[in-house]
Amino acid sequence: MSINLSPETKQQLRDRVQFYQELGIYDFYRRDTSGITITAPEPREEMTPRKSSALPILFESPSTATLEAAVTDPAHALRLIREDIGDCTRCKLSKLGRKQIVFGVGNPNADLMFVGEAPGADEDEQGEPFVGRSGQLLTNMIKAMGLSREEVYIANIIKCRPPANRAPERDECETCSPFLMRQIAVIKPKAIVALGAVAAKTLLAINAPMSELRGRWYDFRGTKLAVTYHPAFLLRDPRQKGEAWKDLQMVMRELGMVPPGK
């Protein structure tokens, strides 16, 4: 028995496949259809998978990263992503001493999102990003912009603390960053600030020094992205705080914000 899909259903299928592809998922798996054949929609040219020459008829992702796409409440959608992560054991960090997942915190409808590198010891202890000394500085930077932590959203490239606070390794970033991509897709911020080289290079897939990455806007999946120094770096070299403030002022101009008076 052949079933012809309505144009609306075909569009929903196209959108869902595009959603998967933006997460880096290109291989799909057929369900047992018990003899029922469904006519596949013709894929749009820009949706042609890299690894497969044809769109599958019925598919299931190897991940359960689908439910939030149909949820209109961002807070609910973020909870679904957190539930999907679970007590994650997808990479080796789960066996290297991390205490808990550090998901993200802030306003699910935020216009501005900050993305750091990885949780540290304080973050691993409390389960919230940027709560240690670096977090206190980031909070002050946000206040200088005339905002509060509750008005923005804060997350990291990876959600588990690396041992001895080392930099995240490539495989760890590749395993964990799709969850961040889903968070960004749900929140839909008007601007993203990448804090530090690891965050910037992972999000932009550009291997360049901070001197070249800063001071300009990047188009990141339809959202504007700026790069500035990580607060931990600013604690080590306070002379660069003025440069970081220039970066934040660029963000403020883009968002139509005026800094509070002294």
Image (spheres, rainbow, N blue to C red):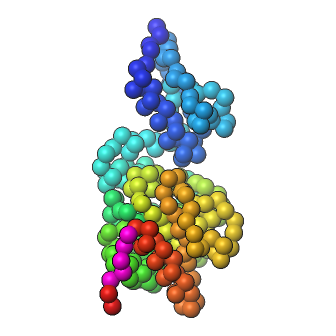
Q: Is residue 234 above or below residue 171?
A: below
Position in image of residue 121 (x %, y %): 49, 77
Horizontal and vertical percent position of residue 57:
53, 23
Span shown in magenta = 256-260
- Residue 19 seen: yes
Q: Quadrant of residue 96?
A: bottom right
Q: Nearer the viewer, residue 126 or 96?
A: 126
> Which residue is at a point 58% across and 36% down the rendered structure image?
47
The spot of residue 82 in percent (x, y) is 40, 54
Foreground of the two, 180 or 96: 180
Q: Is residue 246 above or below residue 191?
A: below
Task: Examine the rendered structure and indicate whether residue 135 appears above or below residue 226.
Answer: below
For the C terminus, the quadrant is bottom left
In which image quadrant can residue 94 be found? bottom right
Residue projecting furthest to the top: 1
Looking at the image, which residue is at 50% across and 14% down?
A: 37
Q: Residue placed at 48% from the left, 74% from the top?
A: 250
Residue 177 magenta-drawn?
no
